[in-house]
Image (cartoon, rainbow, N blue to C red):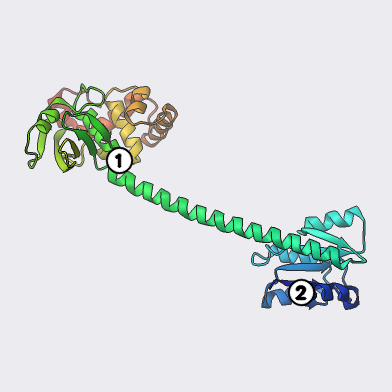
Amino acid sequence: MKTILVVDDLPANVDIVLNHLTTQGYRVLYAGSGKRALQQLEKSLPDLILLDLRMPGIDGLETCRRIKATPDWAHLPVIFMTASDELEQKLAAFAAGAVDFVTKPILPEEVGVRVRTHLRIRELQAELEAKNQKLSEEMELRLDAEKQLETNLDQGFVVANRNGQILFAARQARIALRAYFAELVEGLLPEPIRQWLRVENHDKALKLAVVQKGELQIERIAASDSGHVFLLRLTQGNNAWGPQALTALGLTPREAEVLYWITEGKTNPEISTILNTTLHTIKKHNNNLFEKLGVETRMAAARSALNVLHPQGDRAASGRPGS
């Protein structure tokens, strides 16, 4: 049963409305002033308020403003009852937060129609709010799941067939392959890994050592029933190597990845391809990491990175330029 709060300082003016709403199946509450109406709202909330515009003390406009200023009450539809047909008064009513108004002398049937209409509108609004809330919660859960998935995938997973064709490669796996192998055929694992996949026994992980970059380990995690498709995991023997090490400069993981490829001499378009993102995003990461490093050029940024990737002793041994 819906509850209607009728607020008017003269009960005789609204007796016919009260009787009509009661016969229509509504529970009707009455308040003789704006102050009493506000006190009633503190006890229990109606579904709709019929509010007289002109009352002594707190008039209808001020009462409506206070209702709309209270978060727990702001959703309540307010219909003004007024003997005034002045446009200024009607505009003031809407400005105060009313959804509608009826003009005195009041016609009970008109009030009934307006009450039903605005109760239905409020029901639809509540349904929409509930759906939006549910959608928001679902989106939040989805984003959490995607973040978790991204975290898992960044471990370096690759799905490939026995011929070494790459069916899927996670971001970290793509970075490792490009870093360890100077020449790659698009969509294919490097030849040493392809050779390893051709053997029957993959119980033992493949370990590849690269000067200045340490060891890359490839292990088979799972295989299809046919034995022709494998889930591989690529891990770096030195966890401080590569983009991960550059986070020590105060960079985000993505900024560190961009900076790493700058040190490898890659252009912005090449980096956007490697990291599977837009050129605009790469440029934005460039600007951010330049600011964090206090530099203005790619060369200066690369020198900062080399100090981390290849300390002075390593650079001397490898022939890399110093800072």
Which image quadrant for residue 3?
bottom right
- State left or right for residue 219 relative to residue 280: left
User: Mark 1 belongs to which amino acid?
Assistant: Thr
Q: Is residue 159 above or below residue 147?
A: above
Residues packed near mark 2 inside 10 Å, few (<14), some (14 to 19) or many (20 plus)? many
Q: Nearest the camera: 282 or 301?
A: 282
Q: Is residue 270 visible?
A: yes
Q: Is residue 76 above or below residue 3?
A: above
Q: Could you say where residue 30 lies in the image, as x and y percent from the top left?
A: 79, 77
Q: Residue at x 17, y 42 (%)?
A: 225
Residue where numbered disc 2 is placed:
37
User: Mark 2 belongs to which amino acid?
Assistant: Ala
Which image quadrant for residue 252?
top left
First along the sequence among labels 2 and 1: 2
Residues packed near mark 1 inside 10 Å, few (<14), some (14 to 19) or many (20 plus)? some
In space, the residues marked 2 and 1 are separated at their CA atoms by: 61 Å
Disc 1 secondary structure class: helix
Q: Could you say where residue 264 lies in the image, as x and y percent from the top left?
A: 26, 25
- Per the rendering, the mark at residue 52 is none
- State left or right for residue 238 relative to residue 59: left
- State left or right for residue 92 relative to residue 277: right
Q: Quadrant of the C terminus?
A: top left
Which image quadrant for residue 281?
top left
Q: Could you say where residue 168 lies in the image, as x and y percent from the top left?
A: 27, 35
Residue where numbered disc 1 is placed:
247
Q: Is residue 22 above or below residue 97?
A: below
